[in-house]
Amino acid sequence: MSSDAAAVWLAYNAAENAADFAAMGSLVAADLDVTVNGRPAVASAEDDERAMRQLMVAYPDYRREVDEVLGSGDRAVARWRMVGTPASADLPRLDVPGCSVVRVEDGRIAKAHLYYQGAALDEVLRSAGAGS
């Protein structure tokens, strides 16, 4: 597995956009530690998968578009935009710009800090039990 953080994050994003949960799981540490806007949000690979599955149910055409990725060894910073059409009229269209700062250990994302503003994504994460 690659230890280049930018390459690992881009591979994870490609797997996410393809809804390839096996590939996604292979690219994150079992004890994945994720914060969202500075608050704990995801504490394991299982939490990550659960949150992503819920997001994809709520937004069946979900995808994360990559604006830019900068890497330096085991760290990377990515600017992105999550977009999707809601499955339910109760949810707004998903259009959330954000940024991730990740650290890779042994070819897997071990820590991720996501920063974004977006009530739609917050609601989906809460529904999945991954939000604070």
Image: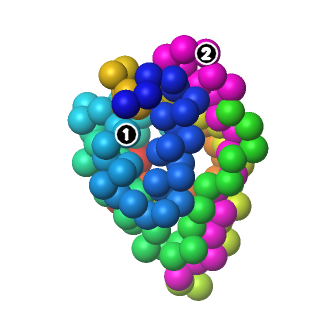
Q: Nearer the viewer, residue 111 or 71?
A: 71
Q: Nearer the viewer, residue 24 or 125?
A: 24
Residue 33: which quarter of the image? top left
- The magenta region covers 70-87
Question: Residue 77 magenta-drawn?
Answer: yes
From this viewpoint, which residue is outermost toward the front?
Answer: 1
Sort mark 1 into few (<14), some (14-19) or many (20+) by Cα contacts within 10 Å.
Answer: many
Q: Which amino acid does label 1 sit on?
A: Leu
Question: Residue 55 magenta-drawn?
Answer: no
- Point out residue 64 in the picture as x, y percentages from the top left corner: 61, 55
From this viewpoint, which residue is outermost toward the top?
Answer: 73
- Can you see residue 43? no
Q: Which residue is drawn at 43% across and 64% down?
A: 19
Secondary structure under tag 2 reads strand
The residue pinned by badge 1 equals 27
Look at the image and tell me in which quarter the N terminus lies: top left
Query: Mark 1 or 2 closer to N-term?
Result: 1
Task: Using the image, tell me which numbered label, if any, was put on residue 72.
Answer: 2
